[in-house]
Image (cartoon, rainbow, N blue to C red):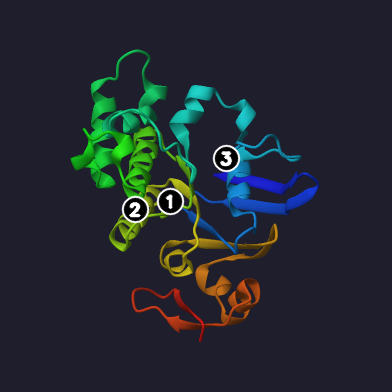
Amino acid sequence: MLEAYKISYAHRKSLILQNIDVSVNYGELLVIVGPNGAGKSTLLSMLANEMGKNEEPIFFKKKTFEEWDEKELAHSKAKFSQNNNHDIPLSVKDVVLMGRYPYFNARPHKNDLEAVVKAMEETDVATLKDRDYTTLSGGEKQRVHLARVLAQLDNDIAHKLVFLDEPLNNLDVLHQHRILHTVKNFTEKGNTAVMVLHDLNLAAQFADRIMLLKKGKIVAHDVPDKVFTKEIISKVYNFPCTICPNPVNKNPLIIFGI
């Protein structure tokens, strides 16, 4: 679904990304991990076509982003950002409704309102629908914006793509797993998700493939048990760890400080 080659990015003469190749399949959840400053969020923004053109074109469903109609692209691709505005003077349901703006001009249709309700239920913010967004906690605001992104991609188009930049920030353990199961259900329908995470154990549990970055370069890109080895993780994070069998699935369980 998504192909990009030789992705590089520099800021004020500092090279943040260096010749990264990415190919993500239909129905796949790719999780990008790495230490602070590895270039994870920058790579995600480059793949989402938010930081200017790469030297080589990025292909989404065999077309460059420039070849897509703007409205059609908004129906097929969405991005959740870790830096959302916290001072939106709207109710929760109106913030989620922003995800439906590509679908109507003046007034939302019935299916737009239904998509908003569904998204709020999936992210457990339906009971907050009439609350002023500015009065919410950080985790509640996070879930509202996740609902907005889900509402945007609620349509009959096949093979949609979502980018998620640290979507679990400020969430308790229940909502972390709830959101990850929602994303997993999304990909199991043939859609694709590219996500930045810090929690390696959650990445191991839910990802189909892992891309591990360090200082703007790919250290490993494979299935979780090939990437999350004691040698690789200890070296990249410069901190000792051990790898144990995960009782939930075949993917590894990483324990630091052992």
Looking at the rendered structure, which numbered label has been put on residue 48?
Answer: 3
Query: Of marks 2 and 1, which one's residue comes earlier in the chain?
Result: 1
Query: Of marks 3 and 2, which one's residue comes earlier in the chain?
Result: 3
Label 1, residues with CA under 10 Å away: few <14, some 14-19, many ≥20: many
Q: Which amino acid does label 3 sit on?
A: Ala
Alpha carbon separation for disc pair 3 and 1: 16 Å
Residue found at x 81% / y 47%: 13
Q: Disc 1 designates what residue?
A: 167
Q: What residue type is labelled 2?
A: Ile
Q: Position of residue 73 (x, y in %)?
A: 51, 29
Which of pointers 3 and 1 indicates the residue nearer the eye?
Answer: 1
**Is disc 2 placed on a helix, strand or loop?**
helix
Which of pointers 2 and 1 indicates the residue nearer the eye?
Answer: 1
Vertical arrangement, residue 234 with respect to residue 51, above or below: below
**Is disc 1 placed on a helix, strand or loop?**
loop
The residue positioned farthest toward the left in the image shown:
127
Labels 3 and 2 touching (C-beta < 8 A):
no
Q: Which amino acid does label 1 sit on?
A: Pro
**Is disc 3 placed on a helix, strand or loop?**
loop
Labels 2 and 1 touching (C-beta < 8 A):
yes
Looking at the rendered structure, which numbered label has been put on residue 179?
Answer: 2
Alpha carbon separation for disc pair 3 and 2: 21 Å
